[in-house]
Amino acid sequence: QVQLVQSGAEVKKPGASVEVSCKASGYTFTNYYIHWVRQAPGQGLEWMGIINCNGGTTAYAQKFRGRVTMTRDTSTSTVYMELSSLNSEDTAVYYCARSSGWNVFDDWGQGTLVTVSS
Amino acid sequence: QTVVTQEPSLTVSPGGTVTLTCASSTGAVTSGYYPNWFQRKPGQAPRTLIYTTSNRHSWTPARFSGSLLGGKAALTLSGVQPEDEAEYYCLLYYGGAQVFGGGTKLTVL
């Protein structure tokens, strides 16, 4: 069955960077896209960007351009999301989600809590 | 900045029917916005219910249906169950970016 398993919780200081991973299994990795979505405490879902797991091309929400980088490793079927210059407003649960094409969402990872605190 | 608007909260009785909507600040929502709908319960990851306007996944109960209604994307729950109490989010595609609505908190009472 399809599984997206994310890395564990992180605590970071303001100004630091964080990398969250999403390891895929149960399907052909390069046939799908992975999105990153976050949810801050008391807030709604926020789309951050997408990576094509085949060619590695990416598209980021304007809000995160210059601060987010999404990459993939086809040898391990893992997608990475790095967010830099962290501040307290980046405290959130970060999710990866799979889609076929840009728009057909299906499975989600379990989420990774990133806490930014001095 | 594009804004996607949902009802902040709705209440429905068990067994009843409720429609949640999803509007775009750019104008009428069409199939070209490829609406997706997600359910989010406390402590759980979101779950995809509907993709590209009206398509259910294998795990989506038949009481959930998606459509376009009056220039908005819509999610209708028919025969609501207590376990449907949750937050519901829509997501619209804007040609290279995607934007979530603010979510609707559905109470089953």
Image (tube, rainbow, N blue to C red):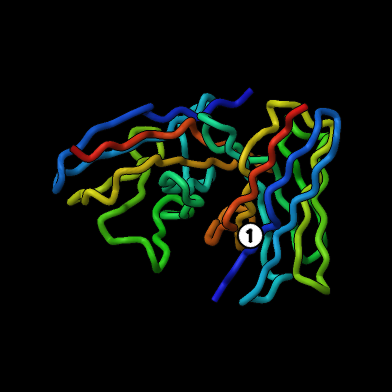
Residue at disc 1, secondary structure: loop
Quarter where residue A57 is shown: bottom right
**Which quadrant: the N terminus of chain B?**
top right
Residue B71 x, y percent position in the rendering: 40, 33
Residue A84 lies, with reference to residue A74, above or below; the image says above
Quarter where residue A74 is shown: bottom right
What residue lies at 82% left-to-right and 55% top-to-bottom? A71
Residue B86 x, y percent position in the rendering: 35, 43
Q: Which amino acid does label 1 sit on?
A: Gly
Residue B81 x, y percent position in the rendering: 21, 51
What residue lies at 40% left-to-right and 68% top-to-bottom? B58
Neighbourhood count class around disc 1 (C-alpha, 10 Å): few under 14, some 14–19, many 20 upward: few
Compared across the picture, whether A54 is left or right of B85 comes to right
What residue lies at 35% left-to-right and 47% top-to-bottom? B67
What residue lies at 83% left-to-right and 35% top-to-bottom? A67
Residue A30 x, y percent position in the rendering: 73, 70
Compared across the picture, whether A108 is left or right of B28 comes to right
Quarter where residue B26 is shown: top right
Q: Name the residue under label 1.
A: A101
Compared across the picture, whether A62 is left or right of B69 comes to right
Compared across the picture, whether B65 is left or right of A20 comes to left
Q: Nearer the viewer, residue B16 or A12?
A: A12
**Which quadrant: the C terminus of chain B?**
top left
Residue B47 lies, with reference to residue B16, above or below; the image says below
- Label 1: chain? A
Residue B76 lies, with reference to residue B1, above or below; the image says below
